[in-house]
Amino acid sequence: MFFSVGVETPQDGNTAWGLIVPALCNDEYGCFSAADDKRSIAPAVREAILITLEAMLQNDRYDIANLVDEGYLSYAEQEAYRDYDSWFVIDVDLSAFEGRQQRINVALPDTLIKRIDNRVKESPDRYRDRSHFLALAARHELVNS
């Protein structure tokens, strides 16, 4: 899933880069982190996202399927995030929170399988493999039905 990340630039050499993930901030949780240098920003925020999600999912009121990121342009306009002077988007694999993998036997027309495989090959940054493609397609259909 893609998450918008706000970055607060340090004012001096003794201050860390401040990081926030607004999509994971609510009345009960906040997703914040800090990094000492630019190279540490992505790993720090990825870790903060995973830790926050783990805590949220232990509370049965949260479901990954219901997570929504409004987009950095929306957050940048909100008063609560005025201190964050730059924004970026990070992709975090949330499959570890979806339960254990199970093998199933599915019959599909060979032409459809070829089309799926071609799409996976064309977009290796988006799809890990055929199963990942089918899981994303199923989630999309279930959310939009």
Image (tube, grey):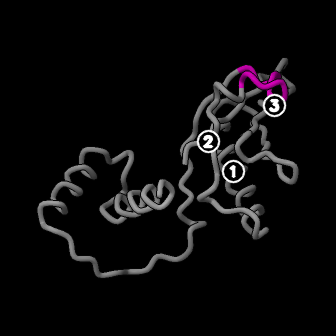
Disc 2 versus disc 3: nearer the observer:
2
Disc 3 versus disc 1: nearer the observer:
1
- State the residue position of label 1: 49
Give the x, y percent position of residue 13.
82, 22
Q: Is residue 92 left or right of residue 30?
A: left
**Magenta region includes residue 74:** no
Q: Residue at x 22, y 57 (%)?
A: 117
* Residue closest to the far front: 145
Q: Which label's residue is closer to the chain start, 2 or 1? A: 2
Helix, strand or loop for disc 1? helix
Q: Of the residues shown, which amino acid type is indicated by label 3?
A: Ala
- State the residue position of label 3: 16
- State the residue position of label 2: 3
Mark 1 Cα shell of 10 Å, populated few (<14), some (14-19), many (≥20): many
Q: Of the residues shown, which amino acid type is indicated by label 1?
A: Ile
Where are the magenta residues, as a range?
76-85
Give the x, y percent position of residue 140.
44, 55
**Magenta region includes residue 77:** yes
Q: Is residue 38 left or right of residue 84?
A: left
Instruction: Give above or below for 138 relative to 26.
Output: below
Mark 2 Cα shell of 10 Å, populated few (<14), some (14-19), many (≥20): many
Q: Of the residues shown, which amino acid type is indicated by label 2?
A: Phe
Residue sitting nearer the eye, 21 or 109: 109
Q: Residue at x 63, y 41 (%)?
A: 69
Q: Residue at x 78, y 42 (%)?
A: 33
Q: Are marks 2 and 1 in contact (CB under 8 Å)?
A: yes
